[in-house]
Amino acid sequence: MRYWLYFAAKLVAGAGAVLALQTALVALYPTPPPLLPGFGPPPPLFLHDLLFTFLTMGVWLVGAGLLFAIIWDQRRRCRTCLRCLIMPINRGSWGHVVVGRPRTEWICPYGHGTLSIEALQITGHQADDWQPHDDNIWKELESYQRTRE
Ligand SMILES: [Zn+2]
């Protein structure tokens, strides 16, 4: 739940940044004079002013890049503690695509789980595989302690 709340918070922050950028563009861009001087409102800027249209498209391009960065960052975070996953390890082989497909595995620095991302997307999009770890290391340490006693 915390994972998805963090993702939603980042999306809201990104949308706010893009909205602020667009609002600043609209506020700072000079308004053109009306088509007929002294009569009627000025024409709308979007699709009528080439520079303003390109600047608006640039703002939305920044927004698309921000969305991509948010999703990319979120995919590589621990589902439990939200820390960035570390130590990517390449598994599998490009020579064995049927059994042992190439993939990259990331691990949480605190051992909460392992994320496996398929490198080969030959049969459509393969979802990331998150495998949570149990507290096996503590159980092993406790059993080791018991055997010593
Ligand atoms: Zn973690």
Image: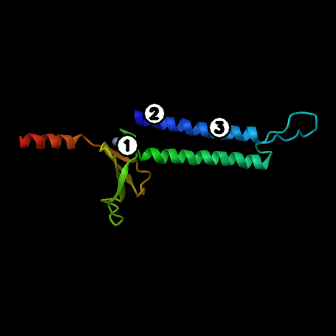
Residue underneath mark 2: 5
Spatial CA span between label 2 and label 3: 22 Å
Mark nearer the N terminus (2 vs 3): 2
User: Which of labels 2 and 3 is toward the front?
Assistant: 3
Q: Which mark, by number, is residue 20? A: 3
Q: Are marks 2 and 3 in contact (CB under 8 Å)?
A: no
- Amino acid type, callout 3: Ala
Whether label 1 touches label 2, CB < 8 Å:
no
User: Mark 1 — residue?
Assistant: 78
Considering only vertical position in the picture, is 49 above or below 39?
below
Residue 62 appears at what percent x and percent y?
62, 47
Near mark 1 (Cα within 10 A), the count class, few <14, some 14-19 or many ≥20, is many
N-term-proximal mark, 1 vs 3: 3
Given the current orientation, which residue lies at the most extreme front position? 149
Label 1 near ligand 1 (CB < 8 Å):
yes
| Label 2 crowd bin: few (<14), some (14–19), many (20+), radius 10 Å | few
- Residue type at numbered disc 2: Leu
- Asked where in the image residue 1 lies, by quadrant, the reply is top left
Residue 37's spot in the image, x, y percent?
A: 94, 38
